[in-house]
Image: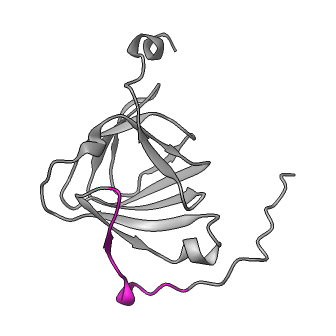
Amino acid sequence: MAEIKNTDHWDFVHNKASEAEWKPGLREIFEYRDVGTKAGTKGDFIAHVIRHTGKPAKDDVQQWHVHECDFQFVYVLKGWAEFEFEGEGVRRLEPGDVILQKPMIKHREIACSLDYEVLEIVSPASFATKLVDAPDQKADAAE
């Protein structure tokens, strides 16, 4: 059986939707709602709802990038998006779809709807996003 992480230092969290605070974040076209998991787990995880602002804008994160994290889970609540993942090709995400990204997988967003909204859970809560070169397409084709 896998070892369970010690969670004795975590707090109980009840984050009410009626009191949600939406803030700007990594991407200009999105706003983010931290649902309290970052504070509740003392930085072990973050769970946030990310939604499109509904305003079209240039977005540099459509470039290839990686997230320096150990775990990344995305659940689509509304709208759609198309992403390209290294070795996995282009994937269209629609309501109810889930993506479990492998750590450090190169990916990029191709497009998303103006009503796109997701729940994302990441560990650790503080992680870097770095732009990277596009994956070697020949290597991807050989897999």
Which residue reaches farthest right?
Answer: 1
- x, y percentage for residue 52? 24, 62
**Within the image, what quadrant is residue 65 found in?**
top left
Residue at 87% over, 52% down? 1
Residue at 40% over, 67% down? 49
For the record, the magenta segment spans 14-26
Residue at 13% over, 61% down? 55
Residue at 45% over, 33% down? 106
Residue placed most toward the observer, 134 or 141: 134
Residue placed most toward the observer, 105 or 78: 105
Q: How is the image coloured?
A: one colour
Q: Is residue 11 left or right of residue 67?
A: right
On the question of residue 80 being in view, the answer is yes
Q: Is residue 125 above or below residue 62?
A: below
Q: Is residue 98 above or below residue 87?
A: below
**Within the image, what quadrant is residue 95 found in?**
bottom left
Is 22 included in the stretch rendered in magenta? yes
- x, y percentage for residue 105? 50, 35
Q: Is residue 116 left or right of residue 33?
A: left
Which residue reaches farthest left?
Answer: 56
**Within the image, what quadrant is residue 130 found in?**
top left
Q: Is residue 17 above or below residue 49?
A: below
Which is the main secondary structure of the residues drawn in magenta? loop
On the question of residue 111 being in view, the answer is no
Q: Is residue 117 above or below residue 127?
A: below
- x, y percentage for residue 45? 60, 64
- x, y percentage for residue 8? 79, 76
